[in-house]
Amino acid sequence: MLTGFKNFILKGNVVDLAVAVVIGAAFGAVVTALVQSVLMPFISGLVGAPNFDSFAVFTLNGNDIKFGVLLTAIVNFLLVAAAIYFVVVVPMNHMIERRNRRLGISPEVKQEAAEDPQIALLTEIRDALRTERPR
């Protein structure tokens, strides 16, 4: 029983997943710091308020309806998405493109995954059956 548990824990997928979660949490802190300490203060300087929480507040039967809180969450989401895109995705794509040029891999040529032989055989059988005509 313990051997099975040890084998499960030491599988590459579990270890890779654990590493990804830890790195993701650490990277999340970096993105949060970028958004909260750089981008939001910049927007606050332009707009004049640190957030939009007090924007578009309506009272209905003694209850406050705060559309500004939703607007703040949407702006924060867009800032986080933009930070990830411009700080991670774009540089990574440039690095991959540069590496592919150095290795002589053309961007038009897509490397096909090795096809399963059983799938290939079944495809051939299907195609052969389509071309045969009933007598």
Image: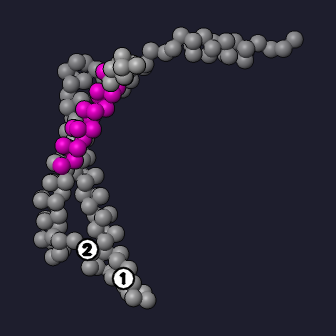
Numbered disc 2: secondary structure: loop
Quadrant of the rendered image containing residue 67: bottom left
Tell me if residue 25 comes above or below residue 10 in the rendering: below
Determine whether, in the image, residue 103 is placed left or right of residue 126: left
Which range is magenta?
Answer: 10-29
Q: Is residue 62 magenta?
A: no
Image quadrant holding the N terminus, namely: top left
Front residue of this view, candidates 104 and 12 = 12
Tag count? 2
Tell me if residue 76 comes above or below residue 114 in the rendering: below
Question: Residue at 25% across / 54% down in the picture?
Answer: 80
Query: Rounded to the nearest whole Å, what is the CA distance between mark 1 and mark 2?
Result: 15 Å
Determine whether, in the image, residue 6 is placed left or right of residue 135: left
Q: Amino acid at mark 1?
A: Asp
> Residue 93, how many percent across, how many down?
25, 35
Task: Specify how the rendered protein is coloured.
Answer: one colour
Question: Residue at 32% across / 24% down in the picture?
Answer: 9
Dot in front, 1 or 2: 1
| Tag 2 residue | 52
| Tag 1 residue | 64
Quadrant of the rendered image containing residue 68: bottom left
Front residue of this view, candidates 113 and 80 = 80
